[in-house]
Amino acid sequence: MTPEKWKAAAITIVAVLAVSLGETLLSKGMKETAGTSATQEAVSIITNRYVIVGTILMALYFGCYMAALKLAPFSFVLPLTALSFITGGALAQFYLHENVTPLKWVGYLVITMGVVIVGLAEAAPR
């Protein structure tokens, strides 16, 4: 793998962590919001600390994703983002205390194996 691809992979891992944590915090924050009117609901959303931090992390994700796409092909970067299924599932279960079923974990692992296969295909000599 070229140095640019290694750099793109590292940036994409940061992006995956940012998107997973950002989505988790958005979920937590949105569950805390409430209001008796649309205006009160909107104020509750935009002032919720979890929503604010989650949104910042989502913006970080997009910045990292764009940087990675500048360094490596889309066909290399996109599959790496699928790792967010594993990190998202872990955060859902252990931070949000959601019931992540064994079948979902199998799905996450199948997706991750697909990522490994795509990565191996990328690394194979042509």
Image (cartoon, rainbow, N blue to C red):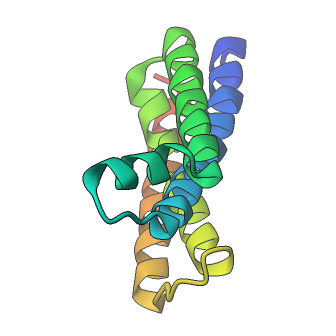
Report if residue 99 is visible in the image: yes
User: Which percent across, then down, holds residue 7?
Assistant: 71, 20
Question: What's the residue at 63%, 22% (across, down)?
Answer: 8
103 over 118 or under it: above or below: below
Of 36 and 13, which appears nearest the observer? 36
For the view shown, which residue lies furthest in the left direction?
38
Which quadrant: the N terminus? Answer: top right
Image quadrant holding the C terminus, namely top left
Q: Nearer the viewer, residue 88 or 41?
A: 41
Where is residue 120 shown, x and y percent of the image?
Answer: 53, 42
- The residue lying at 64 percent from left, 43 percent from top is 53
Q: How many marks?
A: 0
Q: Is residue 85 above or below residue 96?
A: above
Find the residue positioned furthest to the top: 70
Q: Position of residue 60 (x, y in %)?
A: 61, 29
Where residue 10 sits, quadrant-wise, is: top right
Whether residue 117 can be seen here: no
Image coords of residue 51 (percent x, y): 55, 49
Q: Is residue 121 above or below residue 8?
A: below
Q: Is residue 45 left or right of residue 35?
A: right
Instruction: Determine the residue positioned at 60% across, 34% down.
Output: 56
- 27 w.r.t. 115: above or below: below
Q: Is residue 87 left or right of residue 42?
A: right
**Camera-nearest residue between 40 and 3:** 40
Left or right: 44, with 86 as reference point: left
**Viewer-proximal residue, 47 or 18?**
47
Q: Residue at x 62, y 53 (%)?
A: 50
